[in-house]
Amino acid sequence: MTSSVPAVLAERRHQLILRALRAGGPAAVTDLSEQLGVSPATIRRDLVKLEEDGLLTRVHGGAVVEEGDQPFAEVAEVRVNEKDAIAERAAAMIEDGQSVLLDIGTTAYRLARQLHGRRLTVITSNLVVYEELADDEGIELVLLGGMVRREYRSLVGFLTEDNLRQLHADWLFLGTSGVRPGGQVMDTTVVEVPVKRAMIKAGEKVVLLADAAKFPGHGMAKVCGPEDLDAVVTDEPVDAATRASFQEAGVEVVVTGKVQT
């Protein structure tokens, strides 16, 4: 038991280092050492390991991370109450006996937690959703195949896309990294985009789950336009420009408990 403790502590330090770098930009070894309460030598070893894993770049006296997709464990701790409110409203859209396609991401996971005890078919490439619902015998659970993205707990690639071409779902609940004022749905990771597009084709009704931080959020890769959506569920009123884009495309905007007009 005791031999695993250093590894656990190191893993936690690595999460905190990455979070600090994403929040504040480049950081010096001495600053990270003070923040985490460990020696500069320990921080330097951590930075070497994280650079070997491709998670940061060491610079003179410290390190920096490029903007990109954050690991699932980090994102899962952010805006949990808002995500739960969105998930609860989304779950109310679903009728027993229907099929539901759940995207990757933490909001889809919060929605899965709302589905316990329901008589549904759930299809997903989200490994955390699978783990959440695996023991619920009332739910027919379909796990899509594919290559595993370990950090973000998802399945991607041509196998995932091929699986989706053979399926149809009553609902797709889609996640996003950001929504542009023109209503374009964006993602930070190019490898996820083909899977998301295949999900959109497989869904009868497409609902975007996006908390207020996603307007505009971030992301360099376009997943779809507003014309591909049926509804958006969010926790705060959407800005005027984005709302106009959604209205023009006939997209219903649901603000946790009410419809935005």
Image (cartoon, helix red, strand yellow):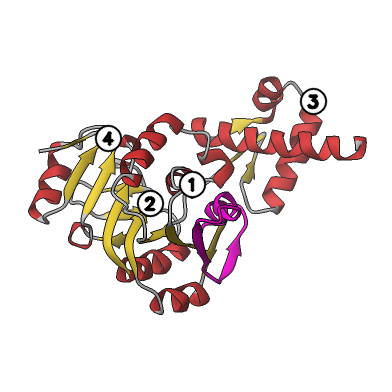
Location of residue 33 (image quadrant) = top right
Which amino acid type is marked by label 1?
A: His
Report the Cα–Cα distance between label 4 and label 3. 46 Å
| Residues drawn in magenta | 126-151
Residue tagged by mark 2?
A: 175
The one nearer the camera, 187 or 68, is: 187
Q: Where residue 77 appears, x then y in whole percent?
A: 53, 34
Q: In front of the other: label 2 or label 4?
A: 4
Please tell me which residue is depicted at 84% across the width and 36% down the height of the picture. 6
Please tell me which residue is depicted at 32% across the width and 52% down the height of the picture. 94
Report the Cα–Cα distance between label 4 and label 1. 20 Å
Total residue callouts:
4
Tell which circle, 1 or 2, labels the residue nearer the N-terminal end.
1
Please tell me which residue is depicted at 67% across the width and 34% down the height of the picture. 61
Residue tagged by mark 3?
A: 39
Mark 3 lies on a secondary structure that is loop
Residue tagged by mark 1?
A: 116
